[in-house]
Amino acid sequence: MRDIFVLAEHRRGELRDITIEMLTKGRELAECCGVPLTAVLLGHGVDRFAEKLASYADTVVLIDHPQLENFNSETYQAALSPLLEDRQPFLTLIGHTAFGIDVAPRLSAQSNIPLATDCIDIRCEDDRVFAVRQIYGGKLNAEVSYENAPQYLATIRPASFPVREYGLKGEIVRTDCPALKTPEREFLEYVEAPAGEVDITQADVIVAVGRGIKEKETLPLVEELAKSLGGVLACSRPIVDAGWLPKDRQVGSSGKTVKPKLYVAIGISGAFQHITGMKGSDTIVAINKDPNAPVFNEADYGIVGDLFKVLPTLKEKIAELKSG
């Protein structure tokens, strides 16, 4: 069996979280299969990223060229195709992001490599690859197998895997960039969405509310709990639809994907759309008066009770712990 490749993703001078998540999973797969893990880095003036990647991968293949400074699927495809043809990696992982959704199908079509998209897990067994994807809007997980082929491609959903540190010292190999034509599409500029009051994707502690809080006037009570825990306030979709919190606070398949150290779900039933966005959290605490609420299936700790009675008690206990 040959190498496992991970395509690094970076933007505006930052290595994206999905890259480290894929390298962590890639390292697990590589150790299981007894093969090397290779990180592939395309860009211009990105040596600092190569050093970071080398702590996870056995080898970092660096292709540096001015035309690769900003992502363009045409130029990335032109640079990657010869590399995949030459090195023949067994499996290549690409983030299921705007970046990966654009370039992965192009590579698959050009090189005739089977592709599984939006995978939440992946494993190798007897020279075969099995991918786990969600179907029926996330209600079911399906494990799918590829047809036998020399190579495989998979795009990985962000926040599907926890991150680990390895502290390796992989070799950084600079590879000449193939001749690149002037692409039909031209990069102009990045246009960022308006910044919200807080970025819930970066929070270590999130306290999220659902329709179970009953009215907007309950929000200050919950926000006080969030602040006492050093966290931020988030919500499920019904709260945004009601206009009680802005869209940038929404967690779920139509909102943001988060993976804090602590996620407290208050009055959230646990519809699969919401679970999709928070199941990667380290510890999940659910508070709901319905003992059959689906959210308890995902929770590490659950409290069945009236949130209006539970929250004041929680605040008191937190205050006692802080004072002690």
Image (cartoon, helix red, strand yellow):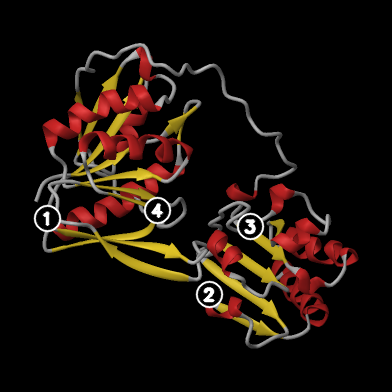
**Left or right of 196 in this view: 44:** left
Question: Along the polypeptide, which appears first: circle 2 or circle 4?
Answer: 4
Question: Along the polypeptide, which appears first: circle 2 or circle 1?
Answer: 1
What residue is pinned by disc 4?
Answer: 163
Label pair 2/3, CB-CB below 8 angstroms: no
Question: Along the polypeptide, which appears first: circle 2 or circle 3?
Answer: 3
Depth-wise, is mark 1 or mark 4 nearer the camera?
Answer: 1
The crowding category of the residue bearing disc 1, from other C-alpha atoms within 10 Å (few below 14, some 14 to 19, many at least 20), is few
Q: Position of residue 69 (x, y in %)?
A: 41, 19
C-alpha separation, residue under disc 2 versus residue under disc 4: 20 Å
Helix, strand or loop status at disc 2: loop
Question: Along the polypeptide, which appears first: circle 4 or circle 3?
Answer: 4
Which residue does the image show at 30% across and 19% down from the upper left? 64
Q: Position of residue 258 (x, y in %)?
A: 56, 55
C-alpha separation, residue under disc 2 versus residue under disc 3: 15 Å
- Name the disc covering residue 251, or none: 3
Q: Amino acid at mark 3?
A: Val
Which residue does the image show at 53% across and 57% down from the upper left? 259
The crowding category of the residue bearing disc 2, from other C-alpha atoms within 10 Å (few below 14, some 14 to 19, many at least 20), is some
- Name the disc covering residue 298, or none: 2
Q: Is 290 above or below relative to 158?
A: below
Q: Amino acid at mark 4?
A: Val
Depth check: give the residue in front, 314 or 264: 264
Which residue does the image show at 58% across and 80% down from the upper left? 296
Depth check: give the residue in front, 79 or 115: 115
Q: Amino acid at mark 1?
A: Gly
